[in-house]
Each structure stands twice: as structure tokens, then as C-alpha cells.
Image (cartoon, rainbow, N blue to C red):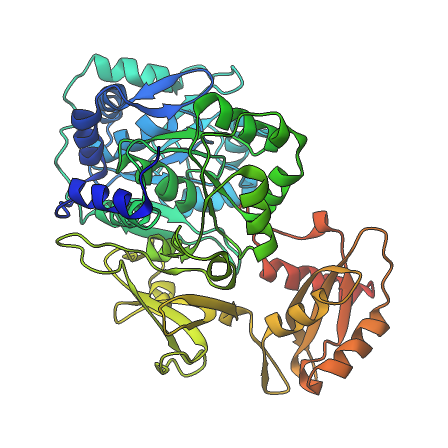
Amino acid sequence: MIPSVGERREQLSRRFPEWTPLTLDGRLERCAQEFGDRPLVLTDERTLGYAEAAEWSARLADGLAALGVRPGDRVGLLMANYLEFVPLKFAIARTGAVAIPFNYLYRQDELAYVLAQSECNVLITMTGFAGLDYLDMLDAIAPGWEREGGEALPDLRQVVLLPTDGRTRDGVLTVDGLGELGAGAPGGAAPGTRTPDDLGDILYTSGTTGSPKGVMVTHDAVQRTAYASALSRAFEDGRRILFSLPCYHMFGYVEGLLAAMMVGGAIIPQTAFSPAGYFEGIERHRATEILCVPTMTVALLEHPDRLTRDLSSLFAVLSGAAPSPIWLWERVRAELGVTELVTGYGMTECGGAMTMSLPEDPLERASATVGRPKLAGVAGLPGDICVYRTVDPVTGEFLPAGAEGELVSTGPTHMLGFWNKPEESALALRDGWVYSGDLGIVREDGYLVLTGRSKELYKSGGELVMPKEIEELLTARPGISQAYAIGVPDDRWGETGCVWIVPEPGVRLDADEIIAFCKENLARFKVPKHVLFAEPSELPTTPTGKIQKFRLVQQAKARIEGGKS
């Protein structure tokens, strides 16, 4: 029988009577000593224990050192949720280098940008995945990359391949070859050259408002976030977390891998999401928790395998990226047998999810808010993991408690800044506060309510317009599945409103009727001038499913200039 939430938190607090900062490789070594052969990674093909992961990462680190990787170098990981990701990630830390887990769904131009912008020295990449050919991409980006990056990537010295589709390149080392190289040169990595407060990761944002930015976070920051998550979610000893959310993203990396390590738990990573795959993984590996976003949760509920698979081990769900309506939480509880439902909110710039509802919270609180600052009650890490306040999105002045404004936060897990982007760093990080770009309210009980995006506000005739108000009005109207309001350039007004509409299946909508409806319900300056229709597949999204409104603006300008609706 699983202990109560309170008992589990007490057990975890006893495990961490005080917070001892460690480097990432130091954390793995500590866990290997404590948990030995316990599973750390579970896949259908192989189980990787803590001790084996530490030994493997040491060999890989010595291999990287033999290639010339030194403290402060930047090593890119272009890799889906394969088992090899884990030892490679800790191997990079062991060398003292900085890990850059890249988004493996980048298009060629995006990959070229982040490789150059990060000044990547060594790249460890899959050969192919999900129809993408990374060897072909590298051929186009930097011809001759097998030897060096050339003019396109002058900092790139070496590429290592994980032959996910069986291919290799003459003269190019594989991950297995990297381990063999390290076995022949033991001790070359010389761990201990970095401190917990040193830069450990550069994590690129998904780019909802422009080009990706490399967020610099320390070894200690991501571990503090992970511990606070385990405490807030009340982990039992040995928790098993199944997810397909990528480990280049804070969700899989921190809320999955690093959080599980705090209690000697295991991750069950999957390289792609499918409801059948989730259900099979839960049954086979006795998962106790799954990580989802709301669209994934809906797909799970609609899949027939939920009726035939043994899901008795599962009792917890963490759903992030977007709020979940209460009916969805109720169905998860009733149809999947889940008793602990948690949501969260945060940013890469803050160290991942900074707020979280608690598993003992009523469903109404998990639906109406994005949680409260994570618990972090150990010596050296007292109280909550961070502090949230709101500021006026125009003047930047702090607002009184309960007032709606731009959410800002401060805490020990927040970023050092953006890699090689001093101006953007200065805008986002001011006097120790990270400015989120999100609009919201900090309630009296400490729970946060999101209300919109300050970066998505636009001015029409000098008046600020909040897109969320328009979107909520329209999506409540029958026949409209999704609505996204944006500002587009206008010769007379500077900017004017434009709304993208996704109709419900089989429904035909009229743009003039939608504008008339807006005139009846909105102030004049908020009424959109343009209404554009799209299918769901036409909407530009990040790999985590967030709508890229800056691309919607580009598409709208092209449509409007072309006279299409």
C-alpha cells in the first residue's frame, strides 16, 4: 500500500535533511552508491541500473576527453528519448563541458542556427529519426563535417553518431566507439573540474516569439527544481515515471529524469507519443506516474486500450503546458483510476516548472490555477523554491498582491542569462527577477492564475488589446474549435486585430458574422478587422504543441496581402 501524501513528504525530507549542492555527474555517482543496481532507465529492450549508468557515463566521458573535450566546451546532444541519452548527458557533465540538448525536430535552417549560435564544439547526433535525416542536414549545413565544421560551423571539431537507422559514415566515431575509446584511456575526464554553481546546460527555448534563445542554467539549479518537484508531488521511494516528452525540454529532463533520481526511481522514456504505447508501457514496467499535456490526456481517454490493459500500478498524472478543464481531470480519475492529479507552470528561464498544484488539492484548484510555488523545505533550501509577483506590463512597476500583471519571479534556480545574447538577457533578467511575458494573478493563497501573454498584447489606435479576451469569447461560440487573436501591421492604426479561426469539423463559418458577433460583445478597438480560417494542421506550433503566434502574424500578413481569407 502506498503511504499517504504526508508520510511520503516526511520520508523524502528525512532523505534530504539538508541540501548539498552537487554537479550533475556528482549526483549520479551519489545515486549509484546509494541505489546500486536499482533501475534508472527502463525500456522494452534493456534496463539500465544506477551503477551501470555511472560506469558507462565514466567511459563515455573519458572518450570525450580523448577527443579533446575540455571544461567549458559545448557538447550538443541531438537525440530523442533513447536510453543512451542518460549516460551521455552525465558523461558531458563529468568532463566539465556544457551540455546542449537540441530539439531533434528542428528543420535544417533551425538546426544550422542553433549549432552556430551555441558555438557547438562536439555534436552527438542520431543518424535519422521520424523521417528526418540528420546526415543529409549536416551535409547541407556544413559540407565536410566529417572532418570539421568549416566556415559554416567554425567551432565544430567533432561529430559522434548514434546509428538509429543503421547507417554510419566512414571515419566518424559512433557512440559505441566513443565508449571503446574511453575504455582505452581511463581517467582522462578528470571529474571535479566544475562546481555546482557552474554552467551545466544550455537549453534552447522553443521559439514561440522568435528565434530560439539558449538559456544558461547551472548544475545545481536543475537539481533544486527536481527536488522541489519530488517534494511537491510527494514521491514514494522508487517512483516510476513514464513519458514521451523529450529530454531536451525541462519537462522530460527535470520533471522526469532528475526528479526520479531524488528517490531512486526510474524513468520509462518513449521516443514518441501514442496512447497504445503509453498503456503498454504502464502495464509492462509498472509505471506509477505519467507525464502529459492536455491533448495527450484526451487521446488516452479516447483510446480503447485503457479498457484492456492492466493500469493498476498507475496513480499519478502530471499535466503541464496548458490548463486542463475540470471535466478532463474528473474523467482521468474515473476512467484511468488515477488518484493524484497535478498541474504546473514555469519556464526554461526559471529552471523548469516553478509552480505546481499539490496532489491533495481539490480538482477545482488544479483546474482554475497553475499551482503555487513548489515546496522546498530542507536546510539550505527553505520554504518555497521561488517567489512570484506581478508588474505593470507597460511600466514594469510592481503591483499590489492580487492585481493582474506580468508575472515575474526570483529564486535560486533561475537562469544565468541567454547564451551570447546580452540585450535579450538584460530584458528578461532584471535585478534578479525573470520577466515571464505571461500575464496573471498571484492569489492570496499563493496560487497563480494565468490570463494571457504580455508579448502577445498589441496596440490598436493606441489602445492595448489582450488577445485572450477575444479568444475566450470566440471559442465559447458554437462552431468554433480554436481561436487565436494577433495584431498585424496597419497603415492607419499602426496595428489592427486579426483572428485565426479553426472551425469545428463539418462547420462552415462566415467572417462577417464573426466580426458582427465581436462588435456586439467587445469594445470597438478590440474588434478584429480580419478573420482568417485554418485547419488544425496549418497552425504553426512548437514541438511541445504551443502555438507560435509570431508565425501566425507572418502567415496572416501573407494571406491579407494576397487577398485570401
Q: Is residue 152 above or below residue 415?
A: above
Q: Nearer the viewer, residue 312 or 451?
A: 312
Confirm whether residue 31 shows in the render: yes
**Residue with the most extreme front position:** 1
Q: Quadrant of the N terminus?
A: top left
What residue is drawn where x is 71% and y is 86%?
Answer: 524
Q: Quadrant of the C terminus?
A: bottom right
Tell me the quarter of the picture where residue 47 sits: top left
Q: Is residue 416 left or right of residue 540?
A: left
Q: Where is residue 379 drawn, in percent x and y?
A: 13, 53
Q: Nearer the viewer, residue 398 or 381?
A: 381
Which residue: 48% across, 21% down? Answer: 284
User: Relative to residue 138, is residue 31 drawn left or right?
Assistant: left
Name which residue lies at 35% across and 47% down: 233
| Residue 335 left/right relative to 154 | right
Q: Is residue 189 above or below residue 541?
A: above
Q: Position of residue 264 (x, y in %)?
A: 27, 31
- In x, y percent, where is residue 312? 48, 30
Q: Is residue 112 above or below residue 404?
A: above
Instruction: Answer yes or no: is residue 101 visible.
Output: no
Percent x, y of residue 275: 60, 33
Direction from residue 49 to residue 357 in the image, left or right: right
Tell me how many marks there are.
0
Q: Nearer the viewer, residue 36 or 62?
A: 36
- Location of residue 46 by image quarter: top left
